[in-house]
Image (spheres, coloured by chain):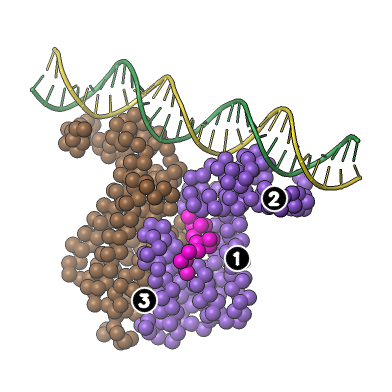
Chain colours: A purple, B brown, C green, D yellow
Amino acid sequence: MPAQLSEQSVHRMRDGALPPRQRIIVAARELFYRHGVQGVGVEAIAEAAGTNKMTLYRHFESKDLLVAEYLRGLAEETARIWDEIAELHPGDALAQIRAWLDRVGGHGERHDASGCALVNAAIQISDPEHPGRKFVESAARTRRERLTALCCASGLTEPEQLADHLFLLVEGARASYRSVGPDGPGAGLCALAAALLASHRATDHAPPG
Amino acid sequence: MPAQLSEQSVHRMRDGALPPRQRIIVAARELFYRHGVQGVGVEAIAEAAGTNKMTLYRHFESKDLLVAEYLRGLAEETARIWDEIAELHPGDALAQIRAWLDRVGGHGERHDASGCALVNAAIQISDPEHPGRKFVESAARTRRERLTALCCASGLTEPEQLADHLFLLVEGARASYRSVGPDGPGAGLCALAAALLASHRATDHAPPG
DNA sequence: TGATCATGTTACCGAACAGTACCGATCTTG
DNA sequence: CAAGATCGGTACTGTTCGGTAACATGATCA
């Protein structure tokens, strides 16, 4: 087995484009998200990547492992988003929570986020032994842990409960985004979350307003 | 086209079992939910229904229309659940809300509910012209309207906001159920919803008892 | 210059898929 | 009993799918 990245970086400058492996991942990310993991074939991915099926199979030994790589990339992006937010608001847990809500909940045009795609994929993968499931679960666990840690550090009351509450709100907004559409109940997510944060300010529950 | 239901009820008593059309619907409901609309073929459905593909196609002219019928049944069940809850707690909007939360959120063993399956199916159906999409959308709209109406009738503050809040919580719990598992943040849904209802009791934080 | 490696291309395989034709058995109803 | 309908079983079509074999091309590097 030769090294992959170093060898490819040699071939990367062929015509200024990305190497085929990267193009395949980009295309897979788009198509898997739009049509579902089961709704798109490897040939369509290869074509969208500007290559062919054979080259795809030279880089991914099966479609399941390509799916796993797709999910691994999404989980990685999720973790990266948390890091970026932490760097943007160092030491300010509440600001980090708000930034996260803005990022994952402010889906006017943006749904390139990872959480929703991970959940969607998890729904479509019924096999519990699928090589990609562990990335879905680890991403969900990471997200929950980091959100809980932020809530604890923010000084708000009942942080664990608040973290789960925020988690469910965001996940619900994303889930309903496809079935109800962008005008659904998810549109008011930011307002709801803001009210929720306000209600966890004091020792007692205060109504939002 | 001959009448369907009357002709079939004649054949219903063949050996005490359901007629094949009903068996197909039951099997499709189970398999579509477990493996996804795209993850199960018509032959597997027919076999699970104790019949064969030919009989299936005598009752459903295509797989897409079988999927549509599946979604129509789910939407119908959603509406029926609301009616049952209304009959169980007549005139008591708050009790109806609590009953709904218990029903759709108290998923220890039960996930025969329809909302989650509808959302899951919506995710897997990328084609906006699919004959089943209208049932998904109408079910979501119905659920939101009825929940909003209940919140308005309950005398709680900011009913529309509360309705969307509850909707997102429940939807988030169901969405995370598959990716995170039953021990995920959805486990505390009932407690979260109870606290949310309490926080919407009065204009100011002064619960009567 | 020649060896090497990744890539592109075409063709192919076996399986599964949606959907159909046909036949025989069974049941209801006249 | 006979007509008519449904149902089950088998076999079939054409397509698409995941995956592979074989060969040609073009770039890199010794």
Q: Real-space Cα distance between discs 1 and 2?
A: 25 Å
> Which quarter of the rendered picture does the C terminus of chain B lie within?
bottom left
**Is label 1 on the same chain as label 2?**
yes
Which residue is more in the foreground, A86 or A10? A10
Residue at x-position 40% and y-position 34%: B43
Could you classify mark 2 by the number of other residues whose Cα lies within 10 Å: few (under 14), some (14-19), or many (20 or more)?
Answer: some
> Which quarter of the rendered picture does the N terminus of chain B lie within?
top left
Q: Nearer the viewer, mark 1 or mark 2?
A: 2
Subunit of mark 1? A
Q: Is residue B19 left or right of residue A136?
A: left
Under circle 2, the secondary element is loop
Q: Which amino acid does the dot numbered 3 rest on?
A: Ala
The residue beneath circle 3 is B195
Could you classify mark 1 by the number of other residues whose Cα lies within 10 Å: few (under 14), some (14-19), or many (20 or more)?
Answer: some
The residue beneath circle 1 is A79
Q: In terms of image quadrants, where is residue D27?
A: top right
- Asked whether residue B34 is in view, the answer is no
The x and y percentages for residue A71 are: 57, 54
- Asked whether residue A50 is in view, the answer is yes
Q: Which mark is residue A1?
A: none
Q: In terms of image quadrants, where is residue A181?
A: bottom left
Q: Which residues are magenta?
A: A105-122
Height in image: A74 above or below D19? below
Q: Which amino acid does the dot numbered 1 rest on?
A: Ala
First in sequence: mark 1 or mark 2? 2
Q: Nearer the viewer, mark 1 or mark 3?
A: 1
The x and y percentages for residue B100 are: 29, 64
Could you classify mark 3 by the number of other residues whose Cα lies within 10 Å: few (under 14), some (14-19), or many (20 or more)?
Answer: few
The residue beneath circle 2 is A19
